[in-house]
Structure formats: structure tokens, C-alpha cells
Image (cartoon, grey):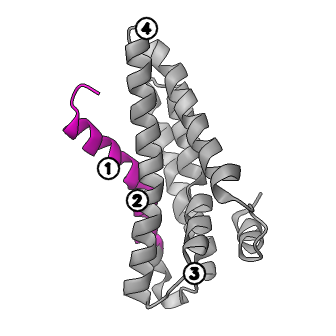
């Protein structure tokens, strides 16, 4: 599907009835399962290592997604005086996170250090956000700033959450 077509469906309310159950949690669980599968190839195979990986990945994906929703909502409210509903921002962030979720799933299954270039596909988030800026009623003059800030939040929030968890619990 093309982002512009999907954004029209999102605007009409036809993307998902329950964004959590129909989209976010399946993507988070797929990424978590992929990371658990990939941990068999990168670590000593023990239940403890697999559980550590699953907990870390699940918390970073969920925490990163909800942190991004919260930060995007507050960013557009303060910067653009736009009081978009939580539901609209949640749908926007969920669909804009598709590339990030997909890359995370691929990196979980292919946890090789040589495959770092797959992370470059996170840049597609810029395009998805740029195509969907009209949903949050961002003017064309403000779109460049909006796209850069929002895409950065969506891409980097899971990594920041993962770093914070590692910092607070070094053995995890």
C-alpha cells in the first residue's frame, strides 16, 4: 500500500477500530518474538538469556511507542497550537511507526552485526510522516520541522528507552 492512500483511510477512520489490538501489539509481539528467535544465534542458549531479551525488547518497543505518542501529542499542541485528539495522534504514530517496527523485526531475526545497513530503512519514516502531516493539520510551511522532529521521536524513542533500561539495570 502507498502511504498517501493509507493516510486517507486513517483520516476516514478506517485504519483500525482498535489500534492497540489490531496493529500495535501484534507488531510489538512480532518484534519481540523475532528478537527471541535471534537471541538463539547471538547468545548462549539459556532460558535466562531469552527472557532477558524478550523483556528488554518488549519494554523498549512498548515504552518507545507510547513515549513517542506522548511526545508527538505534546509537541504539536505546544508548537502548532493544535489540540489533536489522543486517538488521532495514536493512529498517526502507529502507522508512522510501521517502518520502525518492520526494521526491528528484521533486525531481530537477522541479529548479525554485518546487517546494520538495514537500519537505513528507518529513513522511510520521514516519507510516511511527510505524507500524513495533513491528518494533524500541519501547514505546508511547518511540515519540514514537523517531519524531522516527529520522525526523530518515532525512530529514536525505542532506542532511548532501551538505553535507559540498560543504564538502570546493567545486567538486563
Which of the two discs, 1 and 3, labels the residue nearer the N terminus? Answer: 3
Label 2, on which residue?
Answer: 67
Distance in Å between CA atoms under marks 3 and 2: 18 Å
Mark 3 and mark 2 lie on one chain; the one further toward the N terminus is 2
User: What's the distance in space between the residues labelled 2 and 1, CA to CA?
Assistant: 10 Å
Q: CA distance from mark 1 to mark 4?
A: 27 Å
Q: Is residue 153 magenta?
A: yes
The image's mark for residue 136 is 3
Q: Which dot, 3 or 2, sits closer to the camera?
A: 2
- Residue sitting at x 54%, y 59%: 125
Quarter where residue 128 is shown: bottom right
Q: Kindly check if marks 1 and 3 are in contact, taking CB atoms under 8 A apart as contact.
A: no
Along the line of sight, the residue nearer the viewer: 36 or 55: 55
Left/right of residue 171 with respect to residue 128 in the rendered view = left
What residue is shown with label 4? 45
Circles 2, 1 touching at the beta carbon (< 8 Å): yes
Relative to 153, is 80 above or below?
below
Q: Nearer the viewer, residue 33 or 153?
A: 33
Position of residue 48 in the picture relative to residue 110 (left or right):
left
Provide the residue span drawn in magenta.
Answer: 147-172
Residue at position x 56%, y 42% in the image: 28
CA distance separating discs 2 and 4? 32 Å
The picture quadrant where one finds residue 172 is: top left
Residue pointed to by mark 1: 160
Count neighbours of disc 1 (C-alpha within 10 A) and say few if under 14, some if 14 to 19, many if 20 or more. some
Label 2: few (<14), some or many (≥20) within 10 Å?
some
- Viewer-closest of 42 and 166: 166
Amino acid at each position: 500500500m502507498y502511504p498517501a492512500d493509507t493516510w486517507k483511510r486513517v483520516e476516514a477512520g478506517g485504519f483500525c477500530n482498535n489500534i492497540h489490538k489490531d496493529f500495535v501489539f501484534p507488531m510489538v509481539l512480532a518484534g519481540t518474538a523475532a528478537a527471541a528467535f535471534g537471541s538463539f544465534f547471538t547468545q548462549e542458549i539459556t532460558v535466562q538469556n531469552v527472557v532477558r531479551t524478550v523483556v528488554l525488547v518488549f519494554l523498549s518497543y512498548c515504552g518507545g511507542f507510547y513515549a513517542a505518542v506522548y511526545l508527538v501529542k505534546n509537541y504539536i499542541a505546544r508548537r502548532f497550537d493544535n489540540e489533536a485528539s489522543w486517538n488521532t495522534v495514536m493512529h498517526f504514530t502507529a502507522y508512522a511507526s510501521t517502518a520502525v517496527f518492520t526494521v526491528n523485526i528484521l533486525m531481530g531475526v537477522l541479529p548479525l552485526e554485518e546487517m546494520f545497513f538495514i537500519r537505513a530503512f528507518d529513513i522511510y519514516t520521514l516519507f510516511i510522516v511527510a505524507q500524513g502531516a495533513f491528518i494533524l493539520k500541519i501547514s505546508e510551511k511547518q511540515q519540514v520541522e514537523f517531519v524531522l522532529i516527529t520522525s526523530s521521536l518515532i525512530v529514536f524513542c525505542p532506542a532511548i528507552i532501551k538505553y535507559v533500561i540498560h543504564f538502570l539495570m546493567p545486567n538486563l
